[in-house]
Amino acid sequence: MKPVVAILIATALGVVLSAQDYAFACAVCGVDSEPGFLWSMGFLISMPFVIATVTGGYFVYNSRRAKREPANKNIFSE
């Protein structure tokens, strides 16, 4: 196949596949900007930050609590 024909076929295929009808369900296109889709994308994007914040906060809280309490404290002693 000649290079010119291959380029024309690839260009035609790219134009057909990038038409709006074919890209309707694309995640980047926003699916007609439905509110449910936008809320779910916001939730998914924020989850890594929420998980990192909660995990980091847990470790910081435990570290500060361990520094406050005496090391030889026995919970079974009266």
Image (tube, helix red, strand yellow):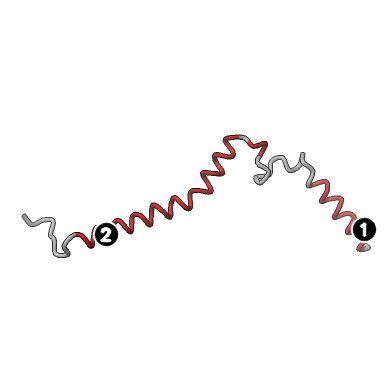
In the rendered image, residue 62, in percent from the top left (x then y), is placed at: 28, 57
Residue corresponding to mark 1: 5
Horizontal arrangement in the rendering, residue 55 relative to residue 37 (left or right): left
Q: Up-down: is 43 above or below 48?
A: above
- Quadrant occupied by the N terminus: bottom right
Residue drawn 57% across the image and 35% down it: 36
Residue drawn 79% across the image and 47% down it: 17
**How many numbered discs, if any?**
2
Quarter occupied by residue 10: bottom right
Quarter occupied by residue 66: bottom left
* Residue at disc 2, secondary structure: helix
- Quadrant occupied by the C terminus: bottom left
Q: Which of marks 2 and 1 is nearer the N terminus?
A: 1
Within 10 Å of the Cα at label 1, are there few (<14), some (14-19), or many (20+) other Cα atoms?
few
Tell me whether circle 2 and circle 1 mark residues in contact (CB < 8 Å). no
Q: Residue 64 carries which label?
A: 2
Quarter occupied by residue 5: bottom right
In whole angstroms, how far apart are the C-alphas of marks 2 and 1?
70 Å
Horizontal arrangement in the rendering, residue 2 relative to residue 34 (left or right): right
Horizontal arrangement in the rendering, residue 39 relative to residue 78 (left or right): right
The three-letter code of the residue at mark 2 reads Arg
The three-letter code of the residue at mark 1 reads Val
Q: Up-down: is 46 above or below 7?
A: above
* Residue at disc 1, secondary structure: helix
In the rendered image, residue 20, in percent from the top left (x then y), is placed at: 77, 41
Which is closer to the viewer, label 2 or label 1? 2
Q: Residue furthest left?
A: 78
Residue drawn 67% across the image and 36% down it: 32
Horizontal arrangement in the rendering, residue 39 relative to residue 64 (left or right): right
Within 10 Å of the Cα at label 2, are there few (<14), some (14-19), or many (20+) other Cα atoms?
few
In the rendered image, residue 30, in percent from the top left (x then y), is placed at: 65, 41
